[in-house]
Amino acid sequence: MNSSSFKKQVGMTLIEVMLALAILGISGLAVMNSASAVLINQGRLQEKTIAFWIASNGLVELKLEKEFPTASWKHETKKMVGKLWYLRYKTVSTANPDFKALDIEVSHKKDGNAIAYLRTYIMKPVK
């Protein structure tokens, strides 16, 4: 046989095509899993951000009242972005009687797990 009668093979074999498709499929699944995780975390991050806004607003309101809150939990409800939020706060004694620690928690349920928690220190109001 003459070497010129053999044609040079052009293209990919079936195994090469199947391997390429498997690699594309696996990489596609990885991208989909990453995108799904981002969407789930975005909702949680939005929820925590709103809860911290509510806690910050509650802190400002308490500071404007110019009275020491009590040492037992006080409960309030706030409506923000179409949802009902539960805010609770109390003071904790410190070594200095003119200052108290103020704890604020925000959750979706009354006495539920806090989504946002803030602690700050307030000074005894001057009368």
Image: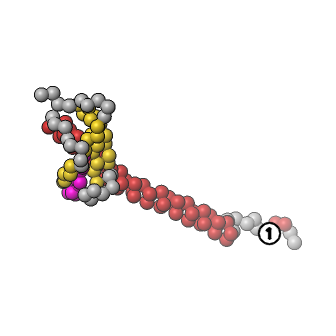
Where residue 124 sits in the image (x, y, percent)? 20, 31
Residue shown at the point (67%, 71%) measured from the top left: 14
Where residue 42 sits in the image (x, y, percent)? 37, 53
Q: Horizontal placement of 69 versus 118: left or right?
A: left
- Check the picture and name the quadrant holding the C terminus: top left
Residue shown at the point (15%, 27%) measured from the top left: 126
The residue labelled by disc 1 is 6
Examine the rendered structure and indicate whether residue 3 appears above or below residue 111: below
**Magenta region, residue range:** 81-89
Examine the rendered structure and indicate whether residue 90 appears above or below residue 24: above
Where residue 68 sits in the image (x, y, percent)? 19, 37
| Element on which disc 1 rests | loop
- Amino acid under label 1? Phe
Colour setting:
secondary structure
31 or 90: nearer the viewer: 90
Q: Which residue is the extreme one toward the left?
A: 127
Q: Horizontal placement of 23 versus 114: left or right?
A: right
89 or 108: nearer the viewer: 89
Is residue 12 a member of the stretch shown in magenta? Answer: no
